[in-house]
Amino acid sequence: MGFNFNLPVNLAFGRGRFGEIGEQCARFGKHALLVISGGSAKRSGLYDRSVALLQKAGVSVTVFDSVQANPLTTTAYSGAEAAKAAVCDVVVGVGGGSVMDAAKAIAFIAKNSGDISDYIFGRSQSDDALPVILAPTTCGTGSEANGFAVLTNPENGDKKSLRCNAIVAKCSIIDPELMETMPRTVLASCGFDALCHCMEAFVSKNASPITDALAKSGMELAAGSLVPLFDGSGSPEQWDALTLGATLGGMVIGIAGVTAPHALEHPASGLRNIVHGAGLAALTPAITERSVAGNPEKYAVIARILGGADSQDCAGLIRRLLRRLELETTLGAQGIDAGDIPWMAENCMRVSAAGIAAHPTTFTQAEIAEIYNECL
């Protein structure tokens, strides 16, 4: 047995802890670029609260609120220019995964010259970025717990993550109270994404005993809380559980990576800007059916967590969960058509090669095209 584990993340978890964001930020800078959603954050009062807490701690604030649902490289460039123009020395991201990913990318671009795609694809290297403080408002991506920033290049549809320890948050403030205003549709999509992170890292060829333990715990926390919360019968303790499960999911993909479901989803949302969780919902059951033979022992563990008996139950249990979350869908319903499939299969093999290689079952480009067709 041999493995490496290095994840320099600083988590501040607990109800009411969002109130610490100003003092945490002040440890690293005096002028923050606040990356935040312009719509929902303003309607909920979180925008005003964030600014007030930062200013109370003596931190000046410049606001950037132009992040899309699937953040673009061009948006990250715009945010970096805003940070540099205002001479910001710290970046604060308050929002869902898109906001947090954009904040991390902005912090990186603000300190590094050249094309961000060169860093994303490993043609250039840097371990420098402005310090980042994060506070998630959705329990899904786990971006608060790793050094990934997923971006889409609008010129070619490539959707891939910038990966760098420099963009791991100096502090991630994880307050489950911030999650409780999520609409049901957002909760379903984000919660399923969190579960997928844990499942994919668990079956990954890059898994280790540590990531296995964290992923298994994350699956148990998410699977045990997501449906009651979606139904409206959940408790504060279940909000805590789902939020922690999502953070564990972010941690384990930071080490073990994602596998085929995310690898196949990214070309779809990169091309058609679909909701990430819905794309995963369209793809994961069919991929699971084709993958169980690659690691039946681990798929059996997943099945038991989802309420089944053995690995053969796994895909059906995922479908059952999606029905209960009103998240059953197809790629066609998300705007993908048959003419998109050749490009998506090629893009998957080129852009998401690491996720395909880490998957327990080896898929060829032709087999990936078959899966896409099956999921239309």
Image (cartoon, rainbow, N blue to C red):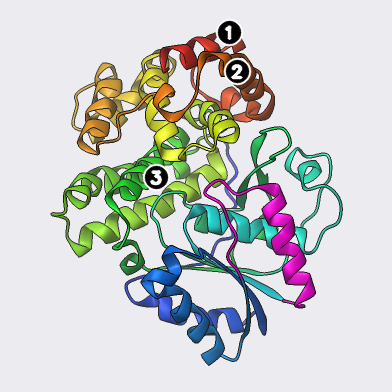
Residue annotated with mark 1: 366
Q: Point out the stretch of residues depicted in magenta.
A: 64-88
Residue situated in front as seen by the camera: 291 or 202: 291
Distance from the alpha carbon under mark 1 to that under mark 3: 28 Å
Residue annotated with mark 2: 345
Residue situated in front as seen by the camera: 162 or 347: 347
Q: Residue at x 44, y 16 (%)?
A: 294
User: Does residue 277 appear anywhere in the picture?
Assistant: yes
| 177 left or right, relative to 293 | left
* Residue type indicated by callout 2: Ala
* Whether residue 123 is situated above or below residue 311 in the rendered picture: below
In the picture as drawn, the residue positioned furthest to the right comes out as: 114
Residue annotated with mark 3: 194
Tell me whether circle 2 and circle 1 mark residues in contact (CB < 8 Å). yes
User: Does residue 212 appear anywhere in the picture?
Assistant: no
Q: Position of residue 9 (x, y in %)?
A: 55, 61
Residue situated in front as seen by the camera: 270 or 228: 270
| 24 left or right, relative to 120 | left
**Quadrant of residue 284 in the image?**
top left
Q: Residues within 10 Å of mark 3 (few under 14, many from 20)?
A: many
